[in-house]
Image: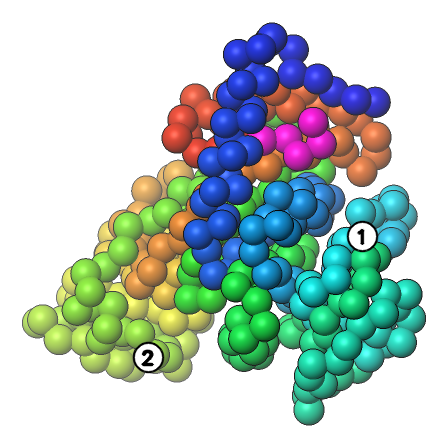
């Protein structure tokens, strides 16, 4: 079923303008992460859409945290869009998938480390075709892979995996596209609410440059007291309630690990600093209840949102109304349905 923009030429013009704005922003990046807010929200289709528009402008590399691009979705059993590469594209996969590939490729690098499906292979496609993208499972390894791929291309695109925002850290990606849609919920209001929440977290205010330089690279929990940062007398943020023993006289607290609901409930009256939004695992309900003062060392550059109106079960929502409502909150941000 093909869905059309129903409000006439003005809407089509707006769609075309948003596409051009999105692609122009992507063209300026070195590393772009495409993050699905739920499985089957169209992130791989978004990747293919971006690649189609950039392939004649940029040398492209494609990677992923974990395995993606499967022909069939492992949860729903539905057909999934594969990642399409053309001659010259650089991509990552693993030994298991590289042996099964049908695209003639030149091996550029084979890792010493292994994943669940073998060593990581970085290859350059010598012909067009579909491939399974499989990448490093950790952020630190991803940094090394991205650095290597930059030697062979001028933009690296990271295809996100289910519930893994870590590859979207602004310490790796200098731009992010959020992919949302009916796979998250068949309730339009829920889609919009959740998408706005993720956008809010991704664009939280940053600390000043001096504080960022002091805290960057520190691991654990640190508190600001009398103008100085010092390591908190607890093993991890999971033991945050033990701070009561030492008094809660500090003004600010830095947590290098995950910020969760339980931690936020205890610290909601303090300034909380985390590395970036990928460290925040706070429910929207808890966030709205406490309206916490959270800052990050570096915030994310969201360059656009894509909407997939088709759910894995075949229900089709009206993407136009979702886009219009999102744009009422985020009027300057390109928001498109890549299936139109």
Q: Which dot marks residue 82?
A: 1
For the residues labelled 1 and 2, the Cα–Cα distance comes to 39 Å
The answer to if 276 sits in the magenta stretch is: no
Q: Magenta segment, which residues?
A: 336-340
Taking depth in this image into account, of 265 and 178 the one nearest to the observer is 178
Q: Is residue 301 left or right of residue 118?
A: left
The quadrant in which the C terminus is found is: top right
The quadrant in which the N terminus is found is: top right
On screen, residue 81 above or below 159: above
Q: Is residue 111 left or right of residue 263?
A: right
Q: Position of residue 179 (x, y in %)?
A: 60, 42
On screen, residue 81 above or below 166: above
Q: Is residue 136 left or right of residue 10?
A: right
Residue labelled with disc 2: 218
The residue at 63%/57% (across/down) is 160
Q: Position of residue 36 (x, y in %)?
A: 62, 48
């Amino acid at each position: 079923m093909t869905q059309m923009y129903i409000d006439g030429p003005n809407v089509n013009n707006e769609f075309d303008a948003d596409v051009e704005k999105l692609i122009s922003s992507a063209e300026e990046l070195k590393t772009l992460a495409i993050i699905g807010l739920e499985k089957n929200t169209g992130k791989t289709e978004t990747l293919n859409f971006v690649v189609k528009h950039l392939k004649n402008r940029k040398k492209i590399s494609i990677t992923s945290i974990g395995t993606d691009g499967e022909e069939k979705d492992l949860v729903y059993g539905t057909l999934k869009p594969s990642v399409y590469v053309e001659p010259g594209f650089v991509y990552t996969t693993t030994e298991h998938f590289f042996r099964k590939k049908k695209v003639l490729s030149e091996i550029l690098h084979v890792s010493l480390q292994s994943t669940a499906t073998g060593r990581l292979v970085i290859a350059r496609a010598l012909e067009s075709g579909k491939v399974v993208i499989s990448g490093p499972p950790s952020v630190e390894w991803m940094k090394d892979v991205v650095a290597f791929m930059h030697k062979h291309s001028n933009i690296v695109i990271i295809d996100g995996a289910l519930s893994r925002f870590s590859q979207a850290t602004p310490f790796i990606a200098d731009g992010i596209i959020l992919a949302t849609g009916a796979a998250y919920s068949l309730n339009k209001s829920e889609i919009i609410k959740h998408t706005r929440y993720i956008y809010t977290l991704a664009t939280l205010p940053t600390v000043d440059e001096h504080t960022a330089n002091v805290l960057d690279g520190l691991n654990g929990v640190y508190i600001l007291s009398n103008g100085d940062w010092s390591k908190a007398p607890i093993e991890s943020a999971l033991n945050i309630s033990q701070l009561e023993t030492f008094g809660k006289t500090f003004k600010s607290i830095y947590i290098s690990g995950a910020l969760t609901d339980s931690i936020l409930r205890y610290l909601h009256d303090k300034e909380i600093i985390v590395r970036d939004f990928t460290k925040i695992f706070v429910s929207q309900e808890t966030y709205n209840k406490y309206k916490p003062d959270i800052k990050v060392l570096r915030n994310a550059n969201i360059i656009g949102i894509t909407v997939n109106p088709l759910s894995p079960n075949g229900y089709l929502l009206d993407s136009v109304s979702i886009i219009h409502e999102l744009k009422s909150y985020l009027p300057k941000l390109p928001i498109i349905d890549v299936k139109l």
